[in-house]
Image (spheres, grey):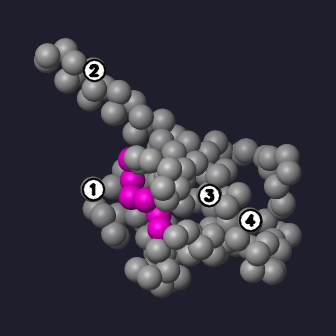
Amino acid sequence: MKGLKISVCLLTVAAMVLALLSCRGEEGEGEQEGTQPVSQLPSSPQSLVERGQAVYDETGCATCHAAPGTGPSIGPVLKDLVKKFSDQDLRRILRDPRTLNPNTTMPPFEGTEEELSALIVYLKTLK
């Protein structure tokens, strides 16, 4: 039984390490095919939502935060954030997740201000 507990702990730690690595992305990554450069962010609300979802996907947020209704996740399910947090709160939390939870393993968002703004627009649509 002790061996099983150790294996489960090791798997949990490995999952957390992989999640952290996927959230950060790799330095110097180029634009992925099919994505818009940040300097050409769309201005319409729907386009910002789409760009925000792309940022969410590209930075690996879904690794820990499952979409509402899709099953268990390591971090909290991101739904109804518009009811809980202002844009300013979300910006602060994403840039420094420890302001909300000092024990979190979530890495700080390291994208541009434009990417962060688009991500916040997308997060506010999750119900």
SS at mark 1 in the image: loop
What span is in magenta? 74-79
**Mark pair 2, 1: CA separation:** 23 Å
Query: Which residue has dot 1 on it?
Result: 103
Q: Residue under label 4, please give it.
A: 51
User: How far across and how far down the image is residue 30, in percent?
Assistant: 79, 46
Residue at image position (61%, 45%) is 25
Q: CA distance from mark 3 to mark 1?
A: 22 Å
Q: Nearer the viewer, mark 2 or mark 1?
A: 2
- CA distance separating discs 3 and 4: 9 Å
Coordinates of residue 92 in the picture (x, y in percent) = 46, 75
Judge from the rendering whether residue 11 lies leftward or rightward of residue 118; answer left or right.
Answer: left
Could you tell me the amino acid type at mark 1?
Answer: Asn
Q: Residue at 40% of width from left, 47% of height from top?
A: 72
- Nearer the viewer's eye, disc 1 or disc 4? 4
Looking at numbered disc 4 in the image, what kind of residue is underneath it?
A: Arg
Secondary structure beneath dot 3 equals helix
Relative to 51, say whether 3 is above or below. Answer: above
For the residues labelled 1 and 4, the Cα–Cα distance comes to: 30 Å
Q: Earlier in the sequence, mark 2 or mark 1?
A: 2
Instruction: Classify mark 4: helix, strand or loop.
Output: helix
Name the amino acid, label 2.
Ser
Asked if disc 2 and disc 4 are in contact, CB closer than 8 Å, the reply is no
Give the image location of residue 123, x and y in percent.
56, 69
> Where does label 3 land, which residue?
56
What is the three-letter code of the residue carrying label 3? Answer: Tyr
Residue 23 is at least partly visible in this image: no
- How far apart marks 2 and 4 lie (CA) works out to 39 Å
Majority secondary structure of magenta residues:
loop
